Each structure stands twice: as C-alpha cells, then as structure tokens.
Image (spheres, helix red, strand yellow):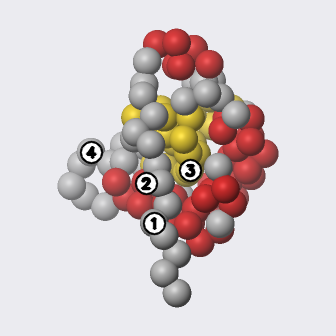
Amino acid sequence: MAIFRNKSFLLALMIFILFSCQHKKEAVKVEQKDYPKIKAVMDSHVDKLMAIDGVVGVAIGALEDSSFCIKVMVKENNPKLQKKIPRQIESCPIVIEETGVIRAFPNKK
C-alpha cells in the first residue's frame, strides 16, 4: 500500500489507466470539470477500498462514454470479492479490473 502514497507514482498510474481502460481506438474525451469531484470521492474512500482483501490499487479511470470512474484493481476477480466492492460510491461508478499483484519498480537514483 505504501507505493500508492507516492503522489508521482499514483499520478502516473492514473494517467496509464485513464488511457488504457478504453476499448475504442479513438481518444477518450473526459470532462475535466468532473475531475475534482471524482478525485475527492476516491481520496475519501481509498483507504476503505484498499483494506478489502484482494484489492491491490485504486485509481481514476474513464468509461466508454467518456465519463470518469473509480477503478478498483484486484489481484484476482471473483464473485466473493465483487460482493465486497460497491458498484458506486457517492454516485461515482466503480469498475473492477483484475490486474494481478502490482509491484513498484526499484528506485534507481
């Protein structure tokens, strides 16, 4: 969980997910005015989501309709885990994505 406290790593992860969670080849066009709300919701619930056994990350993503979502990354997606993760928080949709274990690269200075 400590890797998600590093703001630059979290920002890079959010940008990666924002552009990788689309299924169409065209660019995702999200309303930037909605970003502060989804970020505030994610920030206020990230600790609770990360405390769920099997959750390995939380980030902001984009849906196919170009709206923001909260992406909950899990080691292994299964029905038992899906029951523990809400479908939405404060009217913000949640998308579950199986990513496996996430590890930070060694810090090379």
Point out the tag, 4 or 3, that comes first from the N-terminus: 4
Point out the tag, 4 or 1, that comes first from the N-terminus: 4
Structural distance between the alpha carbons of marks 4 and 2: 12 Å
Q: Residue at x 33, y 48 (%)?
A: 22
Front residue (pair 56, 11):
56
Q: Which residue is mark 4?
A: 23
Q: Which mark is residue 59?
A: 3
Q: Which mark is residue 105?
A: 1
Report the side of 70 relative to 108 (left or right).
right
Point out the tag, 2 or 3, that comes first from the N-terminus: 2
Q: Residue at x 74, y 35 (%)?
A: 48
Instruction: Say whether marks 3 and 1 touch (CB < 8 Å).
Output: no
- Asked where in the image residue 77 lies, by quadrant, the reply is top left
Q: Residue at x 67, y 56 (%)?
A: 2
In percent of width and height, residue 39 lies at 67, 54
Front residue (pair 82, 101):
101
Structural distance between the alpha carbons of marks 4 and 1: 27 Å
Q: SS for tag 1?
A: loop
Tell me if mark 2 has few (under 14), some (14-19) or many (20+) residues whose alpha carbon lies within 10 angstroms of its own: some
Q: Which residue is mark 2?
A: 17
Amino acid type at circle 1 is Phe
Amino acid type at circle 3 is Ala
Disc 3 or disc 1, which is closer to the eye?
Answer: 1
Disc 1 or disc 2, which is closer to the eye?
Answer: 1
